[in-house]
Amino acid sequence: MHVAEKKKGKFQHSSFLAGGATTAAGRLVAHDGVLEAIWPYSGHYHPTEENFMEFISFLEEHHVDLTNVKMCSRR
């Protein structure tokens, strides 16, 4: 999993893989290491509902507590 702050015109989430294929893409909000919100917004990758659910499964498999995480599966 790759996470970085977006810097318009300099660094986008597609920069990690030089625009190559990925399983999921989107945005997240975290403060002090605590995940607060996630959503599958990406103008480059156009993630599907299935991609988003696969990412949610990944987080759960890695014991991320999603109890209070705001999630939006649509843009």
Image: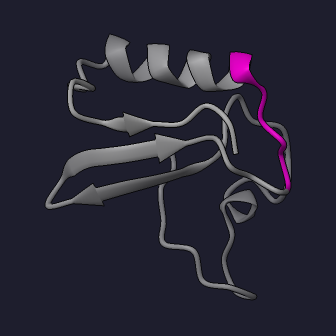
Classify residue 22 by image quadrant: top right
- Direction from residue 2 to residue 64 in the image, left or right: left
In the rendered image, residue 50, in percent from the top left (x then y), is placed at 71, 16
Seen as rendered, the residue at the extreme bottom is 9
The residue depicted at 66 percent of the width and 77 percent of the height is: 11
Q: Main secondary structure of the magenta part?
A: loop
The residue depicted at 51 percent of the width and 50 percent of the height is: 2
Q: Is residue 52 above or below residue 50?
A: below
- Direction from residue 73 to residue 50 in the image, left or right: right
- Direction from residue 72 to residue 47 in the image, left or right: right
Task: Name the image colouring.
Answer: one colour
In the rendered image, residue 63, in percent from the top left (x then y), is placed at 23, 18
Q: Which residues are magenta?
A: 44-50
Q: How many callouts does the rendering have? A: 0
In the rendered image, residue 72, in percent from the top left (x then y), is placed at 54, 36
Question: Is 49 in the magenta?
Answer: yes
Q: Is residue 26 above or below residue 73?
A: below
- Direction from residue 37 to residue 65 in the image, left or right: left
Question: Is 43 in the magenta?
Answer: no
Classify residue 16 by image quadrant: bottom right
* 40 or 5: nearer the viewer: 40
Q: Is residue 59 above or below residue 40?
A: above
The residue depicted at 47 percent of the width and 56 percent of the height is: 3
In the rendered image, residue 31, in percent from the top left (x then y), is placed at 21, 61
Query: Which quadrant is the C terminus positioned in?
Result: top right
